[in-house]
Image (spheres, rainbow, N blue to C red):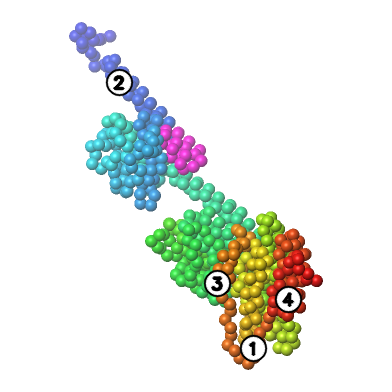
């Protein structure tokens, strides 16, 4: 076997090639580094995939991905910016305190972050201090990887990995992060979709529950308040107002529920008028945001308006949620109004609109319990129209009905908000005056008596006789009047009574006459909170007024013999 190998002369045959030890070591090291890179890549890909399918929220996803990238690349810090409107806003930070961040928002094209987003290209920067595009975000930053986060061809944001040492990242790090940015973008997009679906599901569930409650309620105030509650829970608003159009004058709107700082009433103009006339939502942009008026449609007519002020323009999804609320809300309001009308027929006198005798008994019990609990007083007045039968027999029942209405009108003009009128029967009325002693009640009733006796009733005014009065619109519901103490001190009471203005007298014509009333008053304190004695003594005092010549006010006192 021929061999040309000469060790001394360092000659080698062309048939045999030997690798020296250093070259072999380099090859092995190269292979090991490739293996480490592959393991590193697989580890990151695994962690990213794990985060995609296991994170409960988008914030948890961002924090997890960023923390693992910082760990795998030995970066000093990591940041993720996502696009919101026309700005890139910081959504996650790792290995750095928020207080250490000098900038958390970039415009598109601003700094390395904005430039990367605008150019849709990643950057590997050995020393950011030498890059004119750099705007400091974290002090002492040197090397930085800035990668756009993509979802297919769409840029969602920017990923930043930074080091405080020059040239701390290699080309392999940059290529790897750039490669998996698509997976990160997909994960973020999926998390956003999941969050959106979860929110829609929560809104739909909330809408279902509240709608069920709305449709089961017959109370107008409760229904309207729940309607406002639904809207303010599913969208962010400055204010939200629910108004109902007047059936007689559609230009008048009564606010029945509202939310927010703006407590002004609604005017029949702008978006409100447009929504009413066109029967669909109207919107307008203002200096403070957006205004929306949504009509509440009932059988081709518009019964009310939902008026909303928002900072941001409503999304299609938010508008759909509101529209999903409007239909059941409108039906519930219709039912509540119907129930209120039925309740009105059951509790109110059809002629005068004041509460009837049956409701008087129930309401008096409530008032007595309240004032007794507060250790306060309550007075009751019994009013009887003098010679009422004579007017009925002489002028007919239409005139008698007119007299009853006018007496109620006078009493309403003088009484306070917390005082409640009832038709006790025929030509008799009762008044509950809570938190009022008998002397103060006497002053009020003297005022009413005097105005009625001075008022000239016109017989020939047929239009006035036949006018249908909507008493419910005039009479304020009194049950809610148990608030703070209403017992007037003498100075306040005198000032209040002196400011009251009586009804204007009608011009004198031939067919006019005057009427008078006899009034009896009793108080709860004087009868030791006994309901039956309160009514009985007020009736006795009223009879005494009649016996003493009528057109009088008599206050029952224990020491007086009124039998």
Is there a contact, CB below 8 Å, between mark 2 and mark 1?
Answer: no
Nearer to us in this view, 346 or 548: 548
Q: Above or below — where is 543 with respect to 89?
A: below
Mark closest to the chain's N terminus, 1 or 3? 3
Location of mark 4 (residue):
545
Is there a contact, CB below 8 Å, between mark 3 and mark 2?
Answer: no
Q: Secondary structure at mark 1?
A: strand
Location of mark 1 (residue):
512
Q: Secondary structure at mark 2?
A: helix
Query: Which residue is found at the position 35% from the left and 45% from the top?
Result: 105
* Spatial separation of the CA atoms under disc 3 and disc 2: 106 Å
Q: Is residue 310 left or right of residue 475?
A: left
Q: Above or below — where is 331 with respect to 87?
A: below
| CA neighbours of label 1 inside 10 A, class few (<14), some (14 to 19), many (20+) | some
Q: Bounds of the magenta span? A: 46-69
| CA neighbours of label 4 inside 10 A, class few (<14), some (14 to 19), many (20+) | many
Q: Residue furthest right?
A: 563
Mark closest to the chain's N terminus, 3 or 2? 2
Disc number placed over residue 26 in the picture, else none: 2
Disc number placed over residue 499 in the picture, else none: 3
Is there a contact, CB below 8 Å, between mark 3 and mark 4?
Answer: no
Q: Is residue 499 left or right of residue 161?
A: right
| CA neighbours of label 2 inside 10 A, class few (<14), some (14 to 19), many (20+) | few
Q: Quadrant of residue 350?
A: bottom right
């Amino acid at each position: 076997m021929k061999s040309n190998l000469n060790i001394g002369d360092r000659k080698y045959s062309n048939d045999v090639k030997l690798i020296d030890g250093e070259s072999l070591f380099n090859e092995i090291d190269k292979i090991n580094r490739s293996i480490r890179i592959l393991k590193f890549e697989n580890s990151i890909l695994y962690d990213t995939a794990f985060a995609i399918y296991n994170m409960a929220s988008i914030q948890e996803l961002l924090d997890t991905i960023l923390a693992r990238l910082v760990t795998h690349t030995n970066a000093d810090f990591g940041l993720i910016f996502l696009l919101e409107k026309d700005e890139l806003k910081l959504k996650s930070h790792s290995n750095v305190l928020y207080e250490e961040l000098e900038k958390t928002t970039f415009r598109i094209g601003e700094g390395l972050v904005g430039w990367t987003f605008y150019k849709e290209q990643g950057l590997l920067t050995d020393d950011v201090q030498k890059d004119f595009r750099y705007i400091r975000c974290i002090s002492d930053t040197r090397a930085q990887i800035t990668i756009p986060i993509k979802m297919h061809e769409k840029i969602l944001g920017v990923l930043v990995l930074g080091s405080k040492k020059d040239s701390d990242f290699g080309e392999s790090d940059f290529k790897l992060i750039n490669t998996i940015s698509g997976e990160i973008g997909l994960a973020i997009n999926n998390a956003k979709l999941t969050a959106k679906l979860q929110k829609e599901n929560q809104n739909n569930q909330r809408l279902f529950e509240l709608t069920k409650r709305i449709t089961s309620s017959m109370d107008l105030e409760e229904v309207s308040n729940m309607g406002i509650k639904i809207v303010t829970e599913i969208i962010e608003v400055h204010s939200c107002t629910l108004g109902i159009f007047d059936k007689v004058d559609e230009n008048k709107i009564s606010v029945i529920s509202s939310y927010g700082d703006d407590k002004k009433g609604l005017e029949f103009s702008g978006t409100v008028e447009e929504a009413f006339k066109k029967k669909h939502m109207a919107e307008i942009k203002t200096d403070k945001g957006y205004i929306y008026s949504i009509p509440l449609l009932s059988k081709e007519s518009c019964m009310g308006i939902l008026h909303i002020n928002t900072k941001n323009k409503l999304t299609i999804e938010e508008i759909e949620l509101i529209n999903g609320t409007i239909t059941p809300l409108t039906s519930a309001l219709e039912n509540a109004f119907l129930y209120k009308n039925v309740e009105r027929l059951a509790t109110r006198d059809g002629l005068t609109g004041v509460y009837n005798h049956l409701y008087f008994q129930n309401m008096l019990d409530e008032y007595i319990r309240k004032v007794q609990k507060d250790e306060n007083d309550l007075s009751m007045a019994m009013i009887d129209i003098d010679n009422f039968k004579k007017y009925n027999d002489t002028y007919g029942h239409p005139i008698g009905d007119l007299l009853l209405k006018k007496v109620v009108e006078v009493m309403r003009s003088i009484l306070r908000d917390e005082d409640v009128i009832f038709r006790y029967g025929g030509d008799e009325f009762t008044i509950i005056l809570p938190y009022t002693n008998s002397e103060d009640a006497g002053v009020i009733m003297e005022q009413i008596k005097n105005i009625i006796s001075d008022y000239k009733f016109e017989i020939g005014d047929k239009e006035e006789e036949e006018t249908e009065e909507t008493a419910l619109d005039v009479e304020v519901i009194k049950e809610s009047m148990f608030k703070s103490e209403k017992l007037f001190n003498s100075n306040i009471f005198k000032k209040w009574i002196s400011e009251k203005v009586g009804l204007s007298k009608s011009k004198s014509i031939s067919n006019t006459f005057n009427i008078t009333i006899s009034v009896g008053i009793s108080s709860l304190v004087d009868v030791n909170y006994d309901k039956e004695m309160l009514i009985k003594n007020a009736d006795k005092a009223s009879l005494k007024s009649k016996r003493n010549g009528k057109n009088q006010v008599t206050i029952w006192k224990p020491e007086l013999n009124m039998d």
